[in-house]
Image: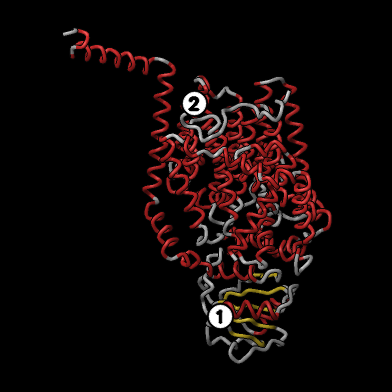
Amino acid sequence: MNPKHSLIPLLNRSWSDWKLKLVSLLTSRSGLQNLISAAVFLLMLFVAYEEFRRLNDFYSEVFRRAVKRPGSLLDRRRVSGCAFNREIPGWDDLLGEASKRIPDSERVLMLPVGPDPPGQHSAHCLLAYELFPRQIIRVYPGKKEQLGRDYLTSIAESRRARYFILYGADKNYDPPFAHCRFGEGLLLVDVKNEISCKPDVN
Amino acid sequence: MLIKAALSTIFLAIIGRSYLRLSLPQSTGWPLSEKLALSWLIGAGVLGWMTHVSLLLSGRVSAAVWLIFGMVLVVDAAIHYRSILTFRPSLTGLRKISVGRISFAALPPLAFLVLQCACLLISSLWFTQGWDGTILWDLKAKAIYLDSASNPGALMAYLNSPTSIHSHLDYPLLLPSCDAWVFFWAGTADEQALKLIGPAFMLSLLALMVRSLTQILPAAHALLFACLLTTASYLFNHSKTGYADIPLAALAGAAAIYGADYLRKQTSSSLFLMALFTGFATLVKKEGILVAAVIPIAMTITLLFARKPADGVRSLLKSACLIAVIACPWSLFLMIHKIPGGDFAPISGAIFTANWNRFMEVIAFMPKLMSERELFGWFWIISAIVAIAGVARWNRPNVSFLGLTCAGYLAAVAAIYIFSAWRPYWTHVQSSLSRLLMHIAPVAVLFAGHSFAEQFFSKPKSDLYAPADLGHPPAQPDKQEAPVA
């Protein structure tokens, strides 16, 4: 039997080869570079995998919706960037009427009624965008302020505005000027008393 | 409406392609992904610039601006009608995408990147524009749209309205111009039509980044660096909204990509694109001025040390001229019409002396914010580790340029809070710093990538490019143009 082909010298030789490779990997410049390169590659692969794992449910939801119910991707199209859902009854009517009645150059005062009605910031943001170029100015009434004729007239005069949008008003609240009511707590008021609404709106 | 919006977005990119081809004829031979990304960014930038010029000269943005912007198609078609008829440029670009040459190691990051991009596009449909997206940017877009259509003078009235000061009247109009373009073609100012604008900027940035990094890294590594950017959830989620931070990050990233490219290859087209995108950054947000200050300075410092001082001065002058031409119309408009801005006090020595300690406080807060897992995941930590692992290569011109840009921008961001007019100023820091950090995130990835990639230069090019190449040629100067002297 040729000693060159025997098992023990073969193993011995391959172990020596591996030893040399290992030493050169750890000591030579290119070997170290390869190690760093592999480590960085694995590290970033791990980060990508972690992100994939974290978003797994999100991916499933996205693709399930896209494949099974593509229409549902547009479900939230009624939600404005202001985080305001326009599905609340009356809003479309208010925006339509206000766009129709109020001239572009007019100022409109938005007045939250009652102590901090929910969603007032979002409502102002939506009104500012949707009713542009009309200027929507937010007014903060004092806590003890009565929203009577004198108060509304004075702030309308001081801001040189004619229309109010009252937000969050009690359903029993009856403004002292001509007005239109849109859904619950949403009123368009004209301090010149010239506004008139259809019976189904008012 | 979404179809109209998508078509108008594509149309904007087609017009941008014409501007690219006319300004850089050699770009016809570039890879398709790079051309698409550049077309979108250049189209958006030129449209924004034209809006500002029109506003400065005539006080409004008439529909003629859209027409003049699109006229370039006719000019381009007249000059390049032969190549358009034969579709030669497109085929050249397509030929460069050879899927068969992607290595096995590149498949997982490629799959992840495709997954992220697909998710971004689909999920952007049901994400809203976000609060700032609507009240700051979409409102300006609506003003431009109405000004050019049914209500001339609406934009000027809005910009001069003291009641609208909360919507940052002094912010420039590049993003609102793109939005108004979509409104114009959709025929209505519905914020739902703007869902694809943010993703378009993000995808352009990713395409340019992959293209740039595959020139210096094996494809698997290059794709992983692009993946790393998408793991910064705060950044990636913002691309589904209408915030201007993503366009600014995309333009800053593109400027850094071509700046580093210029230092490696010395092609005049790279310097031109760097200056162009730096200039466009000033038209996106006020913070773009920081980008426009930091990038040319970083480039000049790098060139002063790496090459002859004359090179540095020449590149600075060229960049400064182009940036000034782009930025001037809006700055002049603000000066002439005295448009107020509310966030910062005027720069003065007294304020600086009184508030200089804010700089150190903000700098000290940055690492804490960067390491917040909910905001940026592992992004900043990994970028820092990889960049530090390549510290021995920071003396290379392209690496030092990117490092200087990162460090300079972070220092500039910390410095601006010295002049914050908010009381207390820390609320200003808390509400805006995380977004400001996003702007420089693409440059940080590039810095890490270039620090890491320089080690591959010692290897034979065949080792580097053959197995893992995405089909791009190895890094070398463009054949069509001579290196800058």
Label drawn at residue A90: 1
Q: Is residue B402 above or below residue A201?
A: above
Q: The residue marked by circle 2 belongs to what chain? A: B
Residue at the bottom extreme of this rendering? A199
Task: Please state, as top left, top right, bottom left or bottom right, where the C terminus of chain B lies in the image.
Answer: top right
Question: x, y percentage for residue B2?
Answer: 58, 63
Which numbered mark, 1 or 2, is in the foreground of this view? 2
Q: Nearer the viewer, residue B34 or B366?
A: B34
Verify CB contact (< 8 Å) between mark 1 and mark 2. Answer: no
Q: Is residue B151 above or below residue B346?
A: below
Helix, strand, or loop for circle 1?
A: loop
Q: Nearer the viewer, residue A10 or B120?
A: A10
Question: x, y percentage for residue B186?
Answer: 65, 65
Q: The residue marked by circle 1 belongs to what chain? A: A
Task: Please state, as top left, top right, bottom left or bottom right, where the N terminus of chain B lies in the image.
Answer: bottom right
Q: Residue, x 60% and y 40% (percent of image)?
A: B93
Q: Nearer the viewer, residue B456 or A173?
A: B456
Q: Amino acid at mark 1?
A: Gly
Instruction: Tell me the quarter of the picture where residue B312 sits.
Output: top right
Q: Are there few (<14), some (14-19), or many (20+) residues within 10 Å of tag 2? A: some
